[in-house]
Image: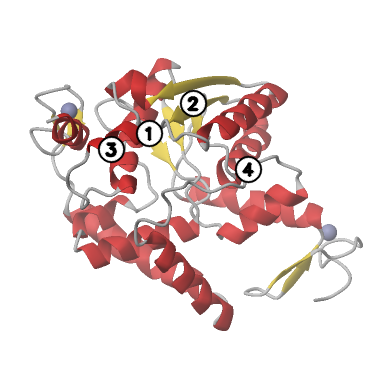
């Protein structure tokens, strides 16, 4: 690593192995925000006058996303608020709710917290107790519940855009999980250009082209407080194994995750174009669904049986 930053004369703090650039903390942050701005415009994620609800869990990715979006949107005059979903995971969620509240206040943005218990009359812990079939993984129940909860929270604050903090590592893992599960249609969902459904919400992932460890470094340099404790259920699914596998590959072959990401985008685009299914409404809850009963109602019914 070079001692001096490639962009200014400060001390270098970060070496981008895949591009060969050495950057100081300030120039690194600047370059990461430039990249996010490019992603946002490349996929037409934002329009003038949008009201953006940022889904913030309290981890490094979502709090960094909030800070980045506030910095970027100052120029665009878009309105930003924070939505947080309380799954009801004891001993884990309480700490992060506190961090989110404090950070939102510090950033001077409105925030809204919504819990699974309020929405589905069942917390995640209760749901996990009730499941009879271990094939229903905690992450698949939680993920389905969370997507719906985020929609409802965003509507309740009159937002028309929902931004989530999925990074390059997250989407690449999801891609491989879908390949291993044979879930071809879901691969199309990964394509970053947002689709607006009947509820008029545009879902965007501004960090989709950023490596996870670069967001971690961004959070560190910018002194963003975050919850370091990970979800107690995170090792139940296959995601952790895939994450470790990809990180091991990247260590020996710098840039390989980015190459794989670009391949994935091309595949996802084709699948998305060929599988644009008509959207119906769920006969039980009235929400958007590709089938007659949506995945949320399916899970809730199965758990309460
Ligand atoms: Zn610099
Ligand atoms: Zn439903």
Image position of 162 (left or right of 303): right
The residue identified by callout 1 is 202
Viewer-nearest of discs 1 and 4? 4
Between disc 4 and disc 3, the foreground one is 3
Please tell me the numbered disc located at residue 129: 3
From the image, tell me which residue sits under label 4: 64
> Label 4: few (<14), some or many (≥20) within 10 Å?
many
Looking at the picture, does residue 66 appear above or below residue 10? above
Does residue 92 lie above or below 110 as drawn? below
**Mark 4 beta carbon near ligand 1 (under 8 Å):** no
Residues at marks 1 and 2 touching, judged by CB atoms closer than 8 Å: yes
Mark closer to the chain start, 3 or 1: 3
Between residues 77 and 261, which one lies in front from this camera angle?
261
Cβ–Cβ below 8 Å for labels 4 and 2? no
Decide which of 248, 270 is in the foreground and name it: 248
Q: Is residue 30 visible?
A: no
First of labels 4, 3 by sequence position: 4
Is residue 159 something that shows in the picture?
A: yes
The numbered mark at residue 175 is none
Q: Secondary structure at mark 2?
A: loop
Q: Position of residue 17 (x, y in %)?
A: 67, 75
Residue ID for mark 2: 50
Scheme by which the image is coloured: secondary structure
- Image quarter of residue 78: top right
Measure the C-alpha gap from mark 3 to mark 2: 40 Å
């Amino acid at each position: 690593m070079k001692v001096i930053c490639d962009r200014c004369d400060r001390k270098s703090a970060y070496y981008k192995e895949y591009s060969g650039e050495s950057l100081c903390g300030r120039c690194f942050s600047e370059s990461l925000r430039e990249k996010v701005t490019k992603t946002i415009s490349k996929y037409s994620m934002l329009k003038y006058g949008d009201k953006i609800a940022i889904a913030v869990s309290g981890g490094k990715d979502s709090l960094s996303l909030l800070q980045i979006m506030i910095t970027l949107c100052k120029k665009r005059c878009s309105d930003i608020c924070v939505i947080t979903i309380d799954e009801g995971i004891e001993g884990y969620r309480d700490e992060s709710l506190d961090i989110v509240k404090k950070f939102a206040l510090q950033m001077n943005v409105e925030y809204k917290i919504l819990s699974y218990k309020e929405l589905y009359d069942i917390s995640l812990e209760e749901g996990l107790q009730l499941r009879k079939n271990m094939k229903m993984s905690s992450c698949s129940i939680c993920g389905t519940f969370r997507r719906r909860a985020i929609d409802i929270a965003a509507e309740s604050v009159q937002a028309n855009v929902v931004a989530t903090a999925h990074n390059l590592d997250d989407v690449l893992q999801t891609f491989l999980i879908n390949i291993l599960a044979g879930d071809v249609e879901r691969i199309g969902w990964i394509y970053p250009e947002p689709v607006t459904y009947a509820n008029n919400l545009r879902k965007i992932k501004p960090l989709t082209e950023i490596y996870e460890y670069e967001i971690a470094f961004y959070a560190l340099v910018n002194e963003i407080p975050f919850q370091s404790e990970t979800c107690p259920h995170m090792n139940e699914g296959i995601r952790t194994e895939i994450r470790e596998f990809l990180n091991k590959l990247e260590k020996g072959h710098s840039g390989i995750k980015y190459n794989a990401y670009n391949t994935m985008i091309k595949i996802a685009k084709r699948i998305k174009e060929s599988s644009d299914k008509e959207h119906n409404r769920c006969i039980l809850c009235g929400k958007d669904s590709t089938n007659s009963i949506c995945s949320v109602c399916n899970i809730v019914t199965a758990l309460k049986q």
